[in-house]
Image (tube, helix red, strand yellow):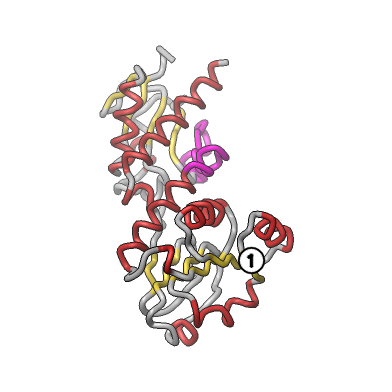
Amino acid sequence: MDSVLIYHKGTTAACAQAAAFLSNRGIGLVDHPTPEVTHLLLDVPSFAPDGQLQGGGQLSQVLERLPPDTIVIGGKLSHPDLHKHAVMDLLTDEEYLAKNAAITAHCALKIAASALETTFRETPTLLLGWGRIGKCLTAQLSGLGCPLTVAARSVKDRAMLGALGVEAVDISEIPGLLPRARLLINTVPTPVLGEEILAKYPKCVKLDLASAPGLVGTGVICARGLPGRYAPESSGRLIAETISRKLREAAI
């Protein structure tokens, strides 16, 4: 990896941590464009909803100052300005996604703990969805002795949850479980519960982690992009480890 030179363009604390970790691993970094740059490091994810870079500005203006064969590193890199560039999209890497889900779950529990008036062991919890983040939350909450029920659409998922000793129900059973829940965590990126039903349970802490709202109403804590906000060092280390691994794989 001696020939690698990364232009660090990211603006988040996590990206700054990633740059530091990469530098400590002996990978060359610069904070400005040069003709020797081989890779461009953006934030993860890299773009705002309007198509600009997360930290502001147009990607095309950055790329025009770099060699045409520069490889772009970031997340969600399906941007029209990248059609001629090779990319390293961390949000398509299964190992990154799994480890990032574990960090997300840890951060979510930090937020929940600050809003709860009870310990997790004393908090009946209803978790909606059993994808990557749902699985990590299940493991972490179970480890804390939390009385947990997981709502999942898939019969296969509910069977596996039962085999793991975790109470599992179908999504359709959620309304009947809300009266006893003190913590509600959603990971499903489609509308699940709205204002009318959620307003009936003001003492229940409601946390929505989904990329698109699944819980809608006043009092819902919308928590997205948690690793970079609440655990930037861990997030940055994971970004750096993933980049290092993918650079090694590319060199083989």
Magenta residue check for 5: no
Residue at 53 percent of width and 16 percent of height: 251
* Viewer-closest of 143 and 236: 143
Question: Which residue is depicted at the point 41% across and 35% down?
Answer: 239
As helix, strand or loop, the secondary structure at mark 1 comes to strand
Residue 84 versus residue 234: which sits nearer the camera?
Answer: 234
Q: Nearer the viewer, residue 187 or 151?
A: 151
The part of the chain drawn in magenta is: 77-99
Q: Which of 157 and 17 lies nearest the eye of the viewer?
A: 157
Horizontal and vertical percent position of residue 85 = 50, 32
Residue displayed at 41% across by 76% down = 204
Asked if the magenta segment contains residue 83, the reply would be yes
Crowding near the residue tagged with mark 1, few <14, some 14–19, many ≥20 C-alpha atoms within 10 Å: many
Q: Quadrant of the N terminus?
A: top left
Identity, as a three-letter code, of the amino acid under mark 1? Ala
**What is the quadrant of the C terminus in the image?**
top right
Name the residue furthest left: 31
Q: Quadrant of residue 153?
A: bottom right
Please provide percent x and percent y for residue 92. Answer: 55, 41
> Residue under circle 1?
168
Q: Is residue 47 above or below residue 190?
A: above
Residue displayed at 40% across by 31% down = 240
> Left or right: where does residue 54 sit relative to residue 84?
left
The image shows residue 222 at horizontal and vertical percentages of 39, 66
Residue 37, above or below 131: above
